[in-house]
Amino acid sequence: MNKKTIYIIIGSFLALGAVFCIVKLVTILYEPKASLTATMSATDTTETEEETEYTAPDESLAIIPTYSTVATDATADVYVCPVDFEKLQGYNSDIYAWIYIKNTNIDYPVVQAPNDDSYYLTHNSDCDYSSAGSIFSEHQYNSKDFNDPVTVLYGHHMMSGAMFGYLQNYFTDDEFWDAEPVIEIYLPDRVLKYAVFATVPYESRHMLHYHDFTDEEVFTEFFDDIMATRSMEARFHEQYAPEAGDKVIALSTCLIGNRYKRFVVFGKMVYDSSVQ
């Protein structure tokens, strides 16, 4: 075999290789757009679902019972409860209080499960399954009479604003905050009013599990730390800061933008209609 023949054979292989590469490149560049779009959409959907899982419950499963708004004039000499608890407890005996905050959409029954403290994370006050859950307290840590040193009410941060969805929006608004908001709690036999003294981002550790607020030193140290919080979300009305012996309510929900923390509103009891 002479050199000319060898060169021809080598050249043929090189030409075939070049043709193969060109065909492959054209196939990649001109792959149907529908196929590429479908692949991208599937990836995007997965990422969105993961984010949604952590930012808020599924709004499509948020079944929220509708009740009449409570009256707000509960300062008469003889307390007449504006909430028909007999009727509500006919639907669900776990309903024991009502929370109302003026100039907000927070106007809901408060529930407490007798056994499973996680039940109302996924059930509304009619006991129907709902991703919005309910406003609730925990039977392991709080009684239903609001006489504990600190009572914590929990509510989901719903993107629609339901439950405690707008809690952070309300309490970080200058005009709303400067008006010195009050939390009202209605019970069958009395109404309680709490002057809000602090709103802060809070770690995810269970507040009542890790602090024995019946210990005056623990109570004082905890709220000293709260009042010393430095954050863009933190606000204070220092004139209402609690002292040992005071009754405090805490409204807890997820912190916007950080699922590992909570946004908590603290109020001190300043009015009890049963005390004259």
Image (cartoon, grey):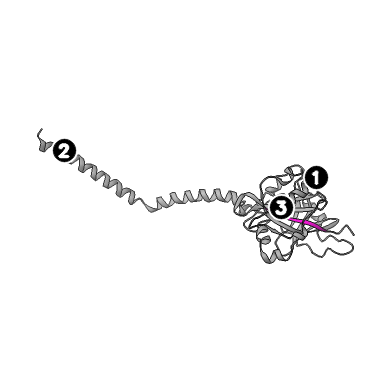
Disc 2 marks a residue whose amino acid type is: Ile
Foreground tag (2 vs 1): 1
Residue name at image x 56 percent, y 50 percent: 51
Q: Which mark is residue 226?
A: 3
Task: List x then y, in percent, for residue 93.
Answer: 79, 49
In the picture shown, does residue 219 fall above or below 183? above
Identity of the amino acid at label 3?
A: Ile
Q: Secondary structure at mark 3?
A: helix
CA separation in Å, label 2 and label 1? 94 Å
Q: Are marks 3 and 1 in contact (CB under 8 Å)?
A: no
- Magenta-highlighted residues: 263-270
Asked whether residue 199 appears in the rendered view, the answer is yes
Query: Do the CB atoms of the residues marked 3 and 2 lie less than 8 Å apart?
Result: no
Q: Is residue 244 above or below residue 69?
A: above
Residue 141: mark in rendering: none
Q: Position of residue 131 (x, y in %)?
A: 65, 50
Look at label 1 and name its amino acid.
Asp
Q: Main secondary structure of the magenta part?
A: strand
In which quadrant is the N terminus drawn?
A: top left
Q: Dot 3: within a 10 Å radius of its alpha carbon, few (fewer than 14), some, or many (20 or more) residues?
A: some
- Report the Cα–Cα distance between label 3 and label 1: 17 Å
Determine which residue is flagged by label 2. 9
Residue sitting farthest toward the top: 1
Secondary structure under tag 1 reads loop
Q: Quadrant of the C terminus?
A: bottom right
Picture disc at residue 215: 1
Q: Which residue sits at x=71%, y=48%?
A: 120
Q: Nearer the viewer, mark 3 or mark 2?
A: 3
Residue in the picture at 66% in, 58% down? 168
Q: Is residue 232 above or below residue 46?
A: below
